[in-house]
Image: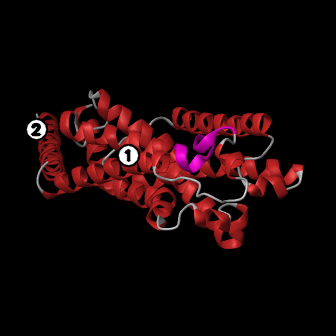
Amino acid sequence: MAKSKKQKRELEAARQAAQVHSAQLETCNDAYTSGAFSYLRFLVHLLAAAQFSWSIYYYLWKVHWPPGLHEEEELKTRWGGKFKYLTFLNVILQAIYHSVALLNDLFGHNGVTLASKSWLRQLRDYLFATLAFPIAHNVCISFWVIYLWDRELIFPAALDAIFPRQVWLNHVVHTNVALLAIMDLFTCFRQYPSRLAGITGNASFMLLYVIWVHIVKYFSGQWVYPLLEVLPLPLRYLMLSGMVALSLILYILGELINNIVWGPEFKLLKQKTIKQG
């Protein structure tokens, strides 16, 4: 009889603990999906989607080679156009990601959960984890490190004639991409995909870009970046391998930061799962 009472007390304690965890999770969801926090998340996605979409339009249709620039016609018709630069491809990627995130804010689901049934939410989380966060920081870090070392190797001074008053564009495509990815990480709860799925998606994108760089070289006779022209063969492929490796490191770093930032929420979800089990 004593044993039966003990079991009842344990069951009651477990039930009360489960109720507490559920109440904490519900409070967390209410704060996260409504009020000021939801407006901040929506604003981040709206401004980012608008900014990157406008930058794509401006970069394609408003940035022109000025008359009189040396080898103007040759520069205009160089194979691959602006789509040969990882910077430009990344801006397109960021515009797509933030547009998907904005649609999810409007029509999907932003709750704190480990298994979302919203396909918009799943797509948003996968795009951010595998591409948007690591590629944005890859572009930002690579560009500014090489630029500060020797800008002629990445953004020659001759291009100042092409971007005479568009300093903002340079920072949008090389700086804001990383800053907005960080803001997104702190405003969006997400469950990262499995490590295998995430690394496969990230590595596939970067390897396809390396192949694209060689295709451009084959048809145009020139490497995409001046740095690749001056590097000897072993260092050239060391650099390209380093780009892929950096992207993978940034993927893992993004996952780690996400788990730290949203650690309390993950803990609540795991406790709820254990209690239900």
Residue for point 22% across, 41% down: 105
Query: Principal SS element in the magenta part?
Result: helix
Please report the bounds of the magenta region as a residue range: 79-89
Q: Which mark is residue 76?
A: none
Q: Is residue 209 above or below residue 117?
A: below
- Residue 86 colored magenta? yes
Q: Residues within 10 Å of mark 1 (few under 14, many from 20)?
A: some
Q: Secondary structure at mark 2?
A: helix
* Amino acid residing under circle 2: Lys
Foreground mark, 1 or 2, reads 1
Q: Which residue is mark 2?
A: 5
Residue 276: x percent and y percent? 23, 33
- Colour treatment of the image: secondary structure
Q: Secondary structure at mark 1?
A: helix
Quadrant where the N terminus sits is: top left
Q: Closer to the N terminus: mark 1 or mark 2?
A: 2
Front residue of 12/129: it is 129
Of all residues shown, which one is farthest toward the front?
Answer: 68
Front residue of 253/135: it is 135
Snapshot quadrant of residue 10 = top left
Residue for point 59% across, 54% down: 65
Residue for point 53% across, 47% down: 88
Residue 59: x percent and y percent? 48, 50
Q: Is residue 123 above or below residue 111?
A: above
Q: Is residue 127 left or right of residue 78?
A: left
Q: Which residue is mark 1?
A: 53
Q: Residues within 10 Å of mark 2 (few under 14, many from 20)?
A: few
Residue 197 in view of the camera: yes
* Amino acid residing under circle 1: Ser
Of all residues shown, which one is farthest toward the bottom?
Answer: 148
**Count of picture labels:** 2
